[in-house]
């Protein structure tokens, strides 16, 4: 896969970051300015949990819920919206499951004056009206996937008119729309990709500095693992310290059994 291949779907700078071998990439000032709304996020010592477990261990957690959308997702949504805006892109498409990512990209795109169309898995669309409300509050168009707007959506509905949808199907719809309008539309993804993991490392970089301020060196760093963005965000900066010999920290990914 080449940078040119990726640029057909993603903003050019994001395509470059996806394949970059640079050790560090600077955070643009415009992105830092928006980050300041909620960053740095608190590193909290869980003294109540320590007491409940009757453990001598010191337990800390990085509280990403203080962002405007209540999750870590804006850490990548903001730079993705910024790079698309700088390229002159006026429309974004994306998918969302429970709505965290859809809310994040709607929030970010609003700051840069970009329209967003979010394909939300139908079962979540029906179950989570307040997430839909958040997206619409920030100006996004939120659609229950599968829709009749795309070939993949129409085919799914032809097979099952009551199709509950899936994340894969919502992705297919979002990508299809973006590819139909290459002049002014790009697709955004909230997890998995290298550039997403890169943006999320702001979590761990802050945590490393905060642990030093607390006079602590973690023995174990634990991150939940779905698509990988949360785990990479907290884990990779600590893992780098281990690889360079600065620390013997153990980094653990915890994945749901489903």
Image (tube, helix red, strand yellow):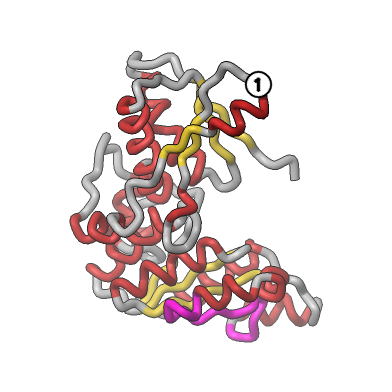
For residue 85: magenta? no
Q: Which residue is mark 1?
A: 54
Q: Mark 1 falls on what kind of element?
A: loop
Q: Residue furthest left?
A: 29
Query: Residue drawn 61% across and 32% down?
Result: 49
Query: Residue 4's x, y, as percent?
Result: 32, 58
Q: Position of residue 161 (x, y in %)?
A: 79, 82
Q: Position of residue 167 (x, y in %)?
A: 64, 62
Work out whether 102 lies above or below 57: below
Q: Determine if residue 91 is in view.
A: yes
- Res 186 → quadrant: bottom left
Could you tell me if residue 180 is visible in this image?
Answer: no
Give yes or no for residue 144 being in the magenta stretch.
yes
- What residue is drawn where x is 69% and y is 73%? 122
Image height of 213 relative to 191, above or below: above
Classify mark 1: residues with Cα within 10 Å, few (<14), some (14-19) or many (20+): few
Task: Give the residue at x 49% y 55%.
Answer: 71
Residue, x 64% and y 85% (percent of image)?
A: 148
Left or right: residue 108 compared with residue 159: left
Percent x, y of residue 162? 80, 79
Q: Is residue 57 positioned above or below 236 on the image?
A: above
In the image: residue 252, left or right of residue 238: right
Quadrant of the image for the C terminus? top right
Front-most of 4 and 101?
101
Query: Could you tell whether 166 is left or right of 118 in the image?
Result: right
Quarter-of-image position of residue 121: bottom right
Find the magenta span and give its range: 135-149
């Amino acid at each position: 896969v080449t940078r040119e291949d990726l640029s057909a779907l993603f903003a050019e700078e994001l395509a470059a970051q996806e394949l970059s071998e640079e050790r560090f990439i600077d955070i643009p000032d415009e992105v830092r300015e928006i980050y300041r709304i909620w960053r740095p996020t608190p590193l909290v010592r869980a003294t109540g949990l320590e007491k409940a477990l009757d453990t001598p261990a010191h337990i800390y957690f990085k509280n990403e819920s203080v962002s405007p959308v209540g999750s870590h997702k804006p850490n990548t949504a903001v730079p993705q919206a910024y790079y698309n805006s700088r390229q002159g892109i006026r429309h974004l498409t994306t998918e969302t499951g429970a709505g965290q990512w859809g809310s994040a990209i709607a929030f970010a795109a609003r700051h840069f004056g970009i329209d967003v169309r979010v394909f939300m898995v139908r079962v979540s669309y029906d179950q989570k009206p307040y997430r839909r409300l958040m997206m619409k509050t920030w100006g996004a168009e939120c659609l229950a996937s599968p829709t009749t707007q795309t070939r993949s959506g129409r085919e799914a509905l032809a097979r099952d008119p009551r199709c509950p949808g899936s994340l894969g199907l919502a992705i297919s719809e979002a990508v299809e729309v973006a590819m139909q309008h290459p002049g002014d539309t790009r697709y955004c993804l909230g997890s998995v990709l290298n550039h997403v993991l890169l943006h999320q490392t702001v979590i761990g970089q802050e945590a490393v500095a905060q642990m030093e301020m607390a006079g602590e060196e973690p023995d174990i760093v634990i991150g939940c693992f779905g698509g990988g963005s949360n785990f990479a965000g907290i884990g990779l900066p600590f893992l780098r310290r281990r690889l360079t010999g600065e620390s013997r920290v153990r980094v653990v990914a915890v994945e749901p059994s489903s």
